[in-house]
Structures are given as C-alpha cells and as structure tokens.
Image (tube, grey):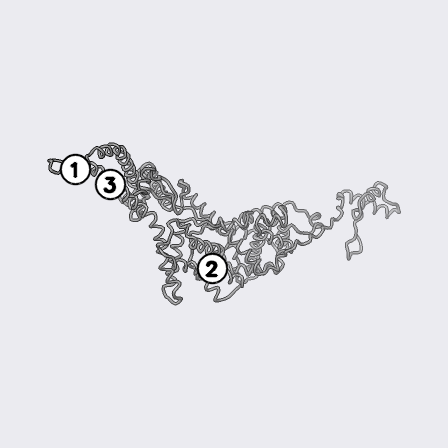
Amino acid sequence: LTLTMLLALTSFPSEFRYNAVHHRLCNCRAAFGSDKCLLPIHEDAAWVSDGMAKESAQANGYLAWGKTPEARRRRAEEARIRALRRRERHLPPRLFELGGALKARFLEFMAQVPALAEECLSLPEQQPRSLPHARQPWTRFCRQFISEIVVLDRAYAMFEKFVLDVMGNIIGKAVEEVKGMAVPSGVVMRTMQDPFRDMQTAVLCQRLGLLKRRVRFGGPHNLVHFDPGVLVKARRLVQMGTHRELCTQAEKMIAKFDALCKVLVDIKIEQIQPEMVENIELKTAVLELEAVWAECQFLLQQEALDFIRDLLDFLRAGGLDERPRWLLRIGLLSTEEATAEAGEEELQRARVTLFETLPILVYIDEVWREITAQRDGKEIGALSRYRELFCPKDDRHHTLRRDFSKFDQHRFSKFRSFLLGTGDDDDAEKNVDRGQVKYFGMLYRQLKEVGAFPLDDPQNIIRLATAPEPQAGHENGMTFGRDVVKEQRRKKLAQEAHARWVCVQRLAQTVEPQLFPVERPMTPERVVRPRQKKVSGRFRMRQSSEALAGSLSGRTPRAGAAQGAAALPDGGSAERTPRPGTSGP
C-alpha cells in the first residue's frame, strides 16, 4: 500500500533504463502516426508491428513492394521499428492516467479528513437505546466514511493492478531469460553422449546472445553473437593437438563455458536479482567467457591455422630482418607500454611494420608464388590464404595480379627492396629510373588500400570488432539506403579482419618467441660513399680526342683539359678507370 501510494504521489517515471533496454512513455502516435503501440512491453503484443505491416502489404501490395516514394517510406519505417524493438519498450499511457486519478482522489480524501474527524468527535459516545433513531448519526457517519474509502480503494486497486502487470512484464522477461538458459545448461553438464547435446549447446549460445543484447555486463568486449561452432572446433582442436598455446586457449574457453553452465544450473530463481548486473556470480562467469571467446572466434578456423603456419615459415626463411621482427613485437604492445619501452618514434615505425609492411609483403609473396607456379605449369592450390582471410573481396586483386605477372624475378626483388627501404645505393645513383620509382609508389598505394590495415592501438581493435553490428539500414534513429547498408557491412568485415590479424600475430609471437627479439637490435651504420661528380659526354669526347691527338703527335693534352681532369674528385677523372678483370678503358 505504501509503495503504490508513493508511486502515485511522486509521479511514476516516464523514462528509465533497465537491463540496457530503454523504457519510455509511448509516443507511437507522434513518431509513426499509429494509434496502437508498436513497441509494447507485453510479450504477446511484441510483434504487432509485423501484423500491421502484413495487413498494409495485403491491402496495398503494389505500394508495399514497389519503387514509389510511399513504398520506400513504408519500408524505411518498418526497418526503424525493427531496430528500435531491440533496445526500446513503451510504457502504456493508461498507467499514467490511473496514477493521476489515484493521486487526485487521494488528495481529495485528505482534504476531507479534517471535516470527517470533526464530525466524528461531535458524535455522542453513548445514547440511550430506548430513544428512537439513537444510532442514526453513527450510521450516517459510517456510511459516508466507507463510501469515501471505497472510491479511494477502487482507484488504488486499478492502479496497483496495472503497475504490477507492467513491472511483472519488465522484470519477468529478464528472469525468464535466465530460467530458459538453465534447462539446456543442465543437459550440457549432465552427459557427454547425449545426441541432443549439440542442439542444446546451440540453444544456450543463442539465449546467451539475447541476454547480452538486453543486459550490459560491462567489460572490454560486447559480444552478442556466440557461434556454437567455435566450441565444436575447440573440442576437436584439443583432441587432435596443434600448437600448445592454442590448445591451452581452447581448453580455457571450454572450461569457462562449463563454468557458466554450472552457474546457471545452480542458480535459484528466487535469488535472482531483477537487475542482471547485480548477480555477481553470473556477471563474472559471462565476462570471463566473453574475454576468451573474443579471440578464439578469430583463431579457431582451419584457414587461420594454415595461415599461421605459412607466416612462421615466412619469418623463419628470412622474410624480415631482425630489426623489423623486433618492431613487430613492439607494435603489439599497448600505446603506453610501447612508448615507455621504445619511444614514440619507434612506436610509429612498429605500427607501420605491423599493419602495413608485413601484410603487404605476405600479400605480394602469395601473388608471386601463384604467378611462378602458373609459369612453371604447376598446380596453384591454396596459396592465397592471406587474401581470403584479411582482404576485401573486389576486382582490385585481379588488377594487381595482372601487374605483377609482367614482372621478372629481378624486378620483383627490386620492388620488394623498395618496400623494405633497402637496396644498393651505388645502383640507385647510377641507374635512377624516376618513372620506375613513381610506378612502384603507385603500386604501393594500391597494395596499401587492399592489403594493409589502419594504424590503431591493438588493445582497441578487438573491442571494436566485437561490438554489436548496427541494425541494417538503421542507426541512431536514422534510416539509410542500400548503399549505406553495404558500407556498414563492409566496415564491419574490415574490423573483423583487422582483429583477426592482431590475434594471429599474438599467437605467432607466443608460439615462437625466439623469432621476435626482446632487446633492440643494433642498427648497422650505413657506409656513405663519396658522390662522384657527373661529367658530360661532350667533355669526355673532347678530352679523349685531344689525348689521342697528343699521343700521335707526341704532345700532351692542352692545359685546360689537364686542369679539368685534375679538378675532378677521386674516381671521377676524365680518363675512364678500367673495370676489374679488364685491361683498358
């Protein structure tokens, strides 16, 4: 009684958040022009908007699926409703009407209390029973008082029933979700040979994702999709055996999943807190499973395991020198740790090496192996694992492969040296081909767009990739077209590829840490050769002709030529120095 009266007198909140779901007073008339609530609290009316959409499509089929502005408006409105249904519910206006009526009736009753009290005190305490109508004042007072109480009680009972119904639907949904997860958890925990165990595991993963959509448990990740196939691959991986570090991670994920099942089986319904975040044991189990699941979902794939083997072979074969491999280790550290260990300048180089140089080198190595195999008439096989796992699917790969097919081994080696910033300085000065350097730069930019990643902090990459994907066509109350939907999906796939690359690099550095130096390698000093002064061809021809004429006539070259030859630096005289192994100019 006290709680209900306080709710009526202090005004029931018209907007609040409960278990990550926004509850507010229904505004469907203003937002959608509908007389019915499209986002009701009651579960049995949750799909009323779909029924209205079907009626609209049947009545106006040519408009509902056509290309007219009205058809596009209706489709956009339905997409907006489906998106809002995930995160918003509407309180019925009747709740506030009943609350206002109870408040008004209670205040009216309180205004009459002084008069009723005065009338009660004026009644005689005892009257002789022999007198006729002796008890009429008391009877009249009691009838008046009871009538006031009945009117107040009627308003109170209607409001209380409605409040309990609304709160029961709000709280009952969260509790029912946990109760629904307890049954499949018991099946998963009881026996390993149950033929329906995989099905119950899939049901549990689906309901866990729905619970995560409604409840924000915190933590660095926000997974809302738990693929049961990841658990199947983890169990198979443990049985088959592979890298010890990866098996340990798979075993950890299986153990955390079993721990969550045990919590759900042992939990008592009467002890469940309506606000799911306040269930500490459940919250801890979910966050621990989520932390290990976030990385395992990117690693427990056969293609990823094959690529890790190829990557380690690439590094063992000398694909990168010692200093770039040290930069790879620095690049995987957080910004604070990397800055403290190597400095901001080295951190920037490390991120470039991790997210640009190494991906491009692996990409062109796969492309060149395909081209070489095709030239030798060998079967290509599965050589493009990097492209399949980390690159967007478009036609630019065919363009790049066509460009590289025009290379020979020497030119491919020069382009690889161009990427690494190495090469023969003497050759670079003698054989400067500015057109080729410009072409290499253009090719590098194309490879960067296709095969490289943004230079982000690795600690935030997985968190962004595990965030919930925005509802197709709708975000923050705005409805987008088909092109924007495709762009959203492309961005999400790019984030997942970025996170998969970070997870693969972490596992590779864990499997073979000796490939990644801990100490900073010494940078070899570059030997700066003296720059030779260029001599024009006309000067060389004139000097040679004078020298020949002098030798025939027994004279020496003219003084100006001799002075010019003497003025040149070492190795740059007018007379050509014989190459090693030759006998003359």
302 or 414: which is nearer to us? 302
Q: Earlier in the sequence, mark 3 or mark 2?
A: 3
**Residue 153, label in figure:** 3
Which residue lies under the disc numbered 2?
Answer: 253
Above or below 28: residue 257: below
Alpha-carbon distance for marks 3 and 2?
56 Å
What residue did someone put label 1 on? Answer: 139
Q: Position of residue 438 (x, y in %)?
A: 62, 45
Q: Position of residue 519 (x, y in %)?
A: 65, 55
Of the residues shown, which amino acid type is indicated by label 1? Thr
Q: Residue furthest right?
A: 554
Task: Tell me: 37 left or right of 508.
Answer: left
Mark 3 or 2: in front is 3
Percent coordinates x, y for residue 562 in the rendering: 84, 43
Q: Are marks 1 and 2 in contact (CB under 8 Å)?
A: no
> Tag 3: residue type?
Asp
Residue 340 can be seen, yes or no: yes
Side of 320 relative to 489 (left or right): right
Report helix, strand or loop for mark 1.
Answer: helix
Q: Position of residue 332 (x, y in %)?
A: 57, 52
Is 5 left or right of 487, judged from the image as shown?
left
Viewer can see residue 394: no
The answer to which of marks 1 and 2 sits earlier in the sequence is: 1
Q: Secondary structure at mark 2?
A: helix
Quarter of the rendering occupied by the N terminus: top left
Give the crowd class for mark 1: few <14, some 14-19, many >=20 residues within 10 Å: few
Instruction: Name the residue type under label 2.
Output: Met
Mark 3 in CB contact with mark 2 (< 8 angstroms): no
Instruction: Note whether 532 is above or below 374 in the view shown.
Output: above
- Disc tally is 3
Q: Is residue 282 placed above or below 486 in the rendered structure?
A: below
